Amino acid sequence: MSAYQLAVRLGKMDHNLLTWFASALQEYQGTELTEDALKVIELQLKLTDEQLSALAHQVKFKPGESISLKTFAVPFLDANMNLLSLFPIDFQIRIHEIRAQLSLLNQEIDQSATLFWKTFDSGITEENQLVIRNNVYSKYQAIEGASRRLADKITNLVPNS
């Protein structure tokens, strides 16, 4: 969901994103409700490229805007790391890779928040404010890509049965 929301706010709404997200929602088997989100995505997939482009422009970040990003935790996985050795090595490696990428993603999210709060510092020059805003935007782009790659890794962790 975070990858989708960030991509939309970055103006990257297109049929590829919507198809990717619809597939993720259809495969999702967790406790969060996804039916309403899937209905919205299915409606958006019916839009033409031009209509999607116009919608993307409407919802894209405006200068100075931000999004509240939350870091991610995997408490069940953390509590059961001692059992990981019961699984094949390839699976163990993929779990450790996901945890490492999640840690990096959380660091990017924390850094984006720190940079965002600096935009309120009146002691920073206008030139540096611009640099900070550009860095926040770059962080959002990095977080969007990392979130999407991480979601794909998690989705591909266990083959569909």
Image (tube, helix red, strand yellow):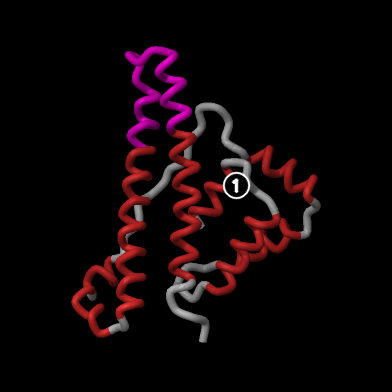
- Residue sitting at the far left: 82
Left of 21 or right of it: where is 88? Answer: left
148 shown above or below 67: below
Q: Main secondary structure of the magenta part?
A: helix
Left of 48 or right of it: where is 138? Answer: left
Amino acid type, mark 1? Val
Displayed quadrant of residue 110: top left
Picture mark count? 1
Q: Position of residue 136 (x, y in %)?
A: 44, 33
130 shown above or below 105: above
106 shown above or below 86: above
Displayed quadrant of residue 82: bottom left
Q: Position of residue 22 (x, y in %)?
A: 62, 65
Q: Residue at x 55, y 74 (%)?
A: 27
Q: Residue at x 43, y 31 (%)?
A: 135
119 inside magenta stretch:
yes
Residue ID for mark 1: 8
Q: Residue at x 33, y 34 (%)?
A: 114
Q: Position of residue 57 (x, y in %)?
A: 68, 38
Label 1: how many residues lie within 10 Å, few (<14), some (14-19) or many (20+)?
many
Q: Nearer the viewer, residue 95 or 59?
A: 95
Left of 87 or right of it: where is 145? Answer: right
157 inside magenta stretch:
no
Element at label 1: helix
Q: Nearer the viewer, residue 132 or 120?
A: 132
Q: Position of residue 159 (x, y in %)?
A: 49, 80
- Residue sitting at the far bottom: 161
96 shown above or below 129: below
**Magenta region, residue range:** 113-135
